[in-house]
């Protein structure tokens, strides 16, 4: 039986009527949640630290801003949108002491609940709405009248209203325009981490770099190697996005399709499948989460070393030069973790 998708008609906005939603954080996801909910008629307060550089941005957007503790006290629903590794500290110091019975504490990713870093009291509802897209897309698609699909889940229903309020939140965010799928905190967390590591970020980045290096080592021009292994990837992904593997294969040449069938399984073989299974096991048993938390708590030295190492990779230098000549791409330049573009939305991850 196929999974059920929930749409606007399945979510009653009255479930949030008269309630205040506190958005904790105003980065990529935070700004999109706050503005989309505000424009959907929800009473929103943004909770930020006193010295946060996001305060003037939120105020200029016409939003009410308060210290995190005050925002929690004023709210019926609290959506925590600070980075995963920073959530526990904010929760312990600013959110937990100010919770009261009947509130709904929400997340856009199940990491901290699933791995036991945050455990709200039993008289508080716990829910999740996890949009399947970055914040700037969540915002721009909403403004255009559409929506980004999302996952939703209820971890604890102390009031009997958690599911209705979570669906109403998804509707106000615009997600039910596209459809939302019900899941659990465990399923969302484990599949999200695995997807990022095996394909979306880790697998794709490693595959692109290795293919580029193989061509350059064989004596081909780096610029040509860039076009063949990175630049054209978007064209293929767009085909996959619209019509799956079959549409991609329908759209490319027969030569490319034949190469897909005979060479793809040689590159991504059973050894890769075994490694993927090991990666999934380490996600499921908490090994990855413990390592990432320890790395973050320890000052992120290895993380920063790896970031710098890849920032200076030849494909990045060649690509930056080529993209600078293609203004139609609206190229983005990333330096020391900060993204700058000629015309862009939020570049922040927090």
Image (cartoon, rainbow, N blue to C red):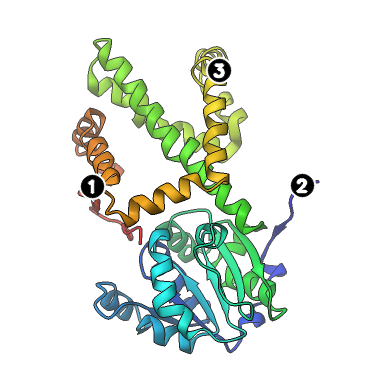
- Locate residue 29 relative to residue 260 in the image: left or right: left
- The answer to whether any part of residue 147 appears in the image is no
Q: Earlier in the sequence, mark 3 or mark 2?
A: 2
Residue beneath the point at 33% across and 27% down: 209
Q: Position of residue 287 (x, y in %)?
A: 49, 45
Foreground pick, 62 / 253: 62
Residue 314: quadrant of the picture: top left
Q: Earlier in the sequence, mark 1 or mark 2?
A: 2
Foreground pick, 36 / 201: 201
Residue beneath the point at 61% across and 54% down: 186
- Locate residue 274 relative to residue 15 in the image: left or right: left
Residue beneath the point at 49% across and 36% down: 198
Residue underneath mark 2: 2
Foreground pick, 89 / 306: 89
Q: Secondary structure at mark 1?
A: strand
Does the residue at mark 1 contact the one at mark 3 (Cβ under 8 Å)?
A: no
Q: Secondary structure at mark 2?
A: loop
* Discs 3/2, front: 3
Q: Position of residue 112 (x, y in %)?
A: 50, 61
Residue underneath mark 3: 265
* Label 1 neighbour load within 10 Å: few <14, some 14-19, many 20+: some
Residue beneath the point at 24% across and 10% down: 219
- Locate residue 157 relative to residue 27 in the image: left or right: right
User: Label 1, label 3: how many angstroms apart (C-alpha)?
Assistant: 34 Å
| Location of residue 256 with respect to 143 vertically, above or below | above
Q: Secondary structure at mark 3?
A: helix
Q: Of all residues shown, which one is farthest toward the top?
A: 218
Residue underneath mark 1: 334
């Amino acid at each position: 039986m196929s999974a059920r998708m929930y749409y606007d008609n399945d979510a009653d906005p009255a479930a949030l009527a008269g309630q205040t939603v506190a958005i904790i954080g105003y980065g990529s996801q935070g700004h999109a949640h706050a503005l989309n909910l505000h424009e959907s008629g929800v009473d929103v307060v943004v909770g930020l630290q006193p010295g946060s550089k996001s305060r003037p941005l939120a105020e200029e957007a016409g939003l009410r801003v308060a210290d995190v503790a005050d925002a929690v006290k004023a709210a019926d629903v609290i959506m925590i949108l600070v980075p995963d590794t920073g959530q526990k500290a904010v929760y312990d110091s600013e959110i937990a002491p100010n919770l009261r019975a009947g509130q709904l504490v929400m997340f856009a990713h199940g990491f901290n609940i699933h791995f036991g870093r945050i455990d709200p009291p039993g008289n508080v509802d716990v829910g999740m709405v996890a949009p399947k897209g970055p914040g700037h897309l969540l915002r721009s698609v909403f403004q255009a009248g559409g929506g980004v699909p999302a996952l939703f889940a209820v971890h604890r229903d102390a009031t009997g209203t958690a599911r209705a309020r979570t669906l109403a939140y998804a509707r106000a965010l615009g997600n039910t325009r596209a459809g939302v799928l019900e899941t659990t905190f465990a399923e969302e967390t484990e599949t999200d981490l695995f997807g990022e590591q095996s394909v979306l970020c880790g697998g794709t980045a490693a595959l692109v770099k290795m293919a580029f290096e193989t061509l350059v080592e064989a004596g081909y021009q780096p610029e040509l190697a860039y076009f063949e292994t990175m630049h054209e990837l978007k064209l293929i992904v767009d085909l996959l996005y619209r019509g799956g593997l079959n549409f991609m294969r329908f759209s490319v040449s027969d030569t490319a399709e034949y190469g897909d069938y005979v060479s793809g399984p040689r590159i991504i073989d059973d050894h890769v499948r075994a490694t993927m299974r090991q990666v999934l096991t380490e996600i499921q048993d908490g090994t990855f989460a413990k390592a990432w938390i320890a790395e973050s708590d320890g000052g992120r030295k290895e993380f920063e070393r790896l970031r710098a190492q890849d920032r200076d990779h030849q494909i990045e230098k060649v690509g930056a030069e080529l993209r600078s000549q293609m203004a139609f791409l609206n190229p983005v330049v990333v330096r020391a973790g900060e993204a700058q573009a000629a015309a862009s939305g939020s570049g922040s991850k927090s």
